[in-house]
């Protein structure tokens, strides 16, 4: 999504300017071409040479620089940009933009661009709460500027509260969203991810190798493409994705309750979680002591969440996953039918690079009409996009009454 994009990064004069260096590194790591514009006060905090070295492009600081104006003047940069990011953005630059002032290289270029503009403010909490500042921010939002909520915490000035520069990784997520097609705007996704844990006693459980990577990738991609997303996640090591309501659960029963409570509000369900089919019939209140040479664990069936969703499907798009180790198509076909889903993403988890706890996957997508599409080895991030392309196409067919 960042790959091949031209991004103009405006850096203004605040202590968080040093964090813009990390932001620049993340953007270039995503293979974006970044052109940095610094205000004069930003150069008091970090030298242009740092940004120039890391971006491998000249840094613009002066509006009236004869050489840079000829080669990469403000109009040329404004036209070239796929996305503008101002990070950190001071109250001053936000006030100038809201007032239509263009008196330096940065504000002039922003004024001349037609690209989306993403602003990551950073300032003292009292400045952030100042009604004048709030009015300016509101005005920018009304005019289509995108604002990244600052974080709360200890500020460089010694105060504590809102106004802290947001994590560069979050700003990158917002940038990817600003660059993504908004073809899922208006959709409300419910995504499940990760394993479930079925407790045997207070220290042991039955579970599986799901890392949550596949489901989280789908949740993030749907959010980037404009959907509202709720993610119901079993225990994983992954961080809650930015912008997404994440509900943490442990067992299949807890996952079922969380899913069914959110089902009425959603338009698309994607069930990537690896739900335990069985749970221990009884849970011991205390740690089970070692004793006999063998022991039998009695299991009882868990609810089949996807089947329940399928029964209450209505006009929702429902996507299931099938994790198999053999007879992939036959089993997936059966699950598609039995669970009443629109698309079944079948992965053979015994294949190298597919399934549990890896960054890639290989899958076949089964449609209700019997069509099967092959998705060869690819990053889960890319597979998520491919699955969402099918959801968009299905939605389109549904609205035209073809499904
Ligand atoms: O999390 P990762 O490490 O990234 O791994 C990704 C994955 C392998 C977990 C994922 O790609 C995947 O295949 N998820 C589904 C795993 C699974 O439980 O498959 P299944 O064939 O047993 O179940 C079929 C479908 O029914 C699934 O959508 C599952 O969520 C659902 N199900 C199953 C059992 C149950 N009791 N309730 C359910 O809802």
Image (cartoon, rainbow, N blue to C red):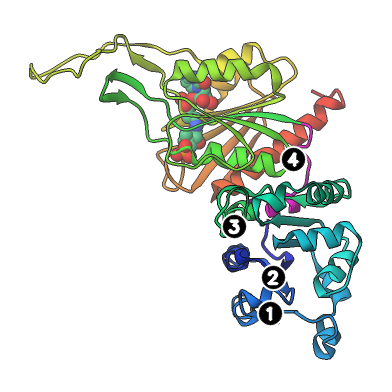
| Residue 57, label in figure | 1
Residue 146 vertical position relative to residue 111 in the rendered view, above or below:
above
Total count of labels: 4
The reply to whether discs 2 and 1 touch (Cβ–Cβ < 8 Å) is yes
Mark 1 or mark 3, which is nearer to you? 3
Q: Is residue 206 left or right of residue 154?
A: left
Would residue 159 appear left or right of 328 to someone viewing this image? right
- Specify the quadrant of the image occupied by residue 258: top right
In the displayed structure, 303 sits above or below 235; it is above
Q: Is residue 17 magenta?
A: no
Marks 1 and 4 close (CB-CB < 8 Å): no
Q: Which residue is mark 2?
A: 34
Residue 12 in sight: yes
Query: Of marks 4 and 2, which one's residue comes earlier in the chain?
Result: 2
Please give the range of residues in magenta: 173-186
Tell me which label, 1 or 4, sits earlier in the chain.
1
Q: Which mark is residue 226?
A: 4
Note whether 245 is above or below 284 in the view shown: below
Label 1 vs label 4: CA separation?
Answer: 32 Å
Direction from residue 243 to residue 328 in the image, left or right: left
Residue 95: x, y in percent? 83, 59
Q: Residue at x 62, y 56 (%)?
A: 165
Sooner in the amino-acid sequence: mark 1 or mark 3: 1
Q: Residue at x 75, y 51 (%)?
A: 178
x, y percent for residue 176: 68, 53
Q: CA distance from mark 4 to mark 2?
A: 24 Å
Mark closer to the observer (3, 4): 3
Q: CA distance from mark 3 to mark 2?
A: 15 Å
Picture coordinates of residue 137, whole percent (x, y):
80, 50
């Amino acid at each position: 999504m960042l790959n091949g994009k031209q991004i103009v990064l405006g850096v203004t004069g605040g202590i968080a300017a040093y964090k813009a260096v990390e932001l620049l590194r993340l953007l270039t790591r995503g293979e974006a071409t970044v052109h940095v514009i610094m205000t004069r006060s930003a150069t008091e905090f970090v030298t242009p040479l740092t940004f120039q070295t890391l971006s491998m492009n000249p840094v613009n600081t002066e509006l009236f620089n004869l050489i840079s104006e000829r080669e990469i003047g403000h109009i040329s940069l404004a036209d070239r940009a796929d996305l503008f990011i101002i990070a950190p953005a001071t109250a001053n630059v936000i006030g100038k933009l809201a007032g239509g002032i263009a008196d330096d290289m940065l504000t002039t270029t922003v004024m001349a661009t037609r690209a989306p503009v993403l602003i990551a403010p950073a300032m003292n909490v009292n400045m952030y709460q100042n009604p004048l500042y709030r009015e300016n921010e509101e005005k920018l939002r009304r005019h289509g500027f995108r604002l990244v909520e600052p974080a709360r915490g200890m500020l460089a000035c010694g105060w504590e509260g809102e106004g802290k520069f947001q994590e560069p990784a979050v700003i990158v997520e917002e940038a990817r969203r600003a660059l993504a097609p908004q073809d899922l705007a208006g959709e409300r996704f419910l995504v499940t991810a990760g394993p479930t844990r079925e407790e045997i006693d207070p220290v042991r459980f039955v579970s599986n190798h799901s890392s949550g990577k596949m489901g989280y990738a789908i949740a993030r991609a749907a959010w980037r493409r404009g959907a509202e997303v709720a993610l119901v996640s079993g225990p994983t090591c992954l961080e809650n994705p930015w912008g997404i309501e994440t509900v943490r659960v442990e067992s299949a029963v807890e996952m079922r309750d969380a899913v069914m409570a959110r089902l009425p509000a959603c338009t698309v369900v994607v069930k990537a979680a690896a739900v335990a089919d069985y749970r221990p019939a009884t849970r011991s209140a205390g740690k089970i002591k070692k004793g006999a040479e063998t022991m039998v664990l009695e299991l009882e069936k868990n609810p089949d969440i996807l089947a329940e969703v399928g029964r209450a499907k209505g006009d929702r798009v429902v996507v299931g996953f099938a994790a198999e180790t053999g007879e992939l198509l036959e089993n997936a076909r059966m699950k598609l039918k039995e669970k009443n889903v629109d698309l079944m993403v079948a992965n053979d988890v015994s294949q190298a690079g597919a399934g549990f706890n890896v960054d890639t996957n290989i899958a076949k997508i089964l449609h209700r009409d019997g069509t099967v599409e092959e998705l060869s080895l690819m990053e889960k991030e890319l597979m998520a996009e491919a699955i969402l392309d099918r959801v968009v196409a299905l939605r389109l067919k549904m609205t035209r009454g073809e499904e």
